[in-house]
Amino acid sequence: MIQHQLAIQARFCPEILERILRVTRHRGFQIRALNMDHAINSDSVCIELTVVSQRPVNLLFAQLVKLVDVSGVEIQHKNSQLISA
């Protein structure tokens, strides 16, 4: 399996994390790590997501950027790590 790391910028709302997790699961990716940071005086949230899959990360990227509350998605590691399963 190949590991990918993504940085997601989104508007903070109660359902945003659920939407991101649902899209991730539907696209065939398993979550290995998740970190979410919300500034107190801001309505935005930064989510760092580490996922693994045999599928290309562009499939997940293309769906995440379509979410209404997501303002940006960046693939952090261009050199993905190979994980033996």
Image (spheres, helix red, strand yellow):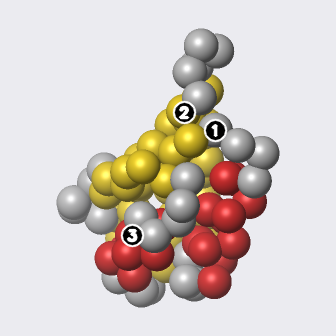
Question: Which residue is depicted at the point 53% across and 65% down?
Answer: 67
Which residue matches tag 2? 44
Give how far apart the Cα atoms at labels 1 and 2 are.
5 Å
Give how far apart the Cα atoms at labels 2 and 3 are.
19 Å
Residue 49 appears in the rendering: no
Which residue matches tag 1? 12
The single residue placed furthest to the top in the displayed view is 41
- The label on residue 61 is 3
What is the secondary structure assignment of the residue under circle 3? Answer: helix
The single residue placed furthest to the right in the displayed view is 14
- The label on residue 84 is none
> Which numbered mark, 2 or 3, is in the foreground of this view?
2
Q: Is residue 14 left or right of residue 36?
A: right
> As displayed, is residue 6 above or below residue 54?
above
- The disc, 1 or 2, on the residue closer to the chain's N-terminal end is 1
**Amino acid type assigned to the residue bearing label 3 in the image:** Phe
What is the secondary structure assignment of the residue under circle 1? Answer: loop
Q: Which quarter of the picture shows residue 26?
A: bottom right
Question: Which residue is depicted at the point 64% across and 38% down?
Answer: 12
The single residue placed furthest to the front in the displayed view is 68
**Amino acid type assigned to the residue bearing label 2 in the image:** Ser
Residue 45 appears in the rendering: yes
Q: Which quarter of the picture shows residue 32?
A: bottom right
**Amino acid type assigned to the residue bearing label 1 in the image:** Phe
Q: Is residue 16 left or right of residue 64?
A: right
Give how far apart the Cα atoms at labels 1 and 3 are.
19 Å
- Asked whether the residues under the numbered discs 1 and 2 touch, taking CB atoms below 8 Å apart as contact, a structural biologist would say yes
- The disc, 2 or 3, on the residue closer to the chain's N-terminal end is 2
Residue 65 position within the rendered picture, expressed as x and y whole percent measured from the top left = 42, 65
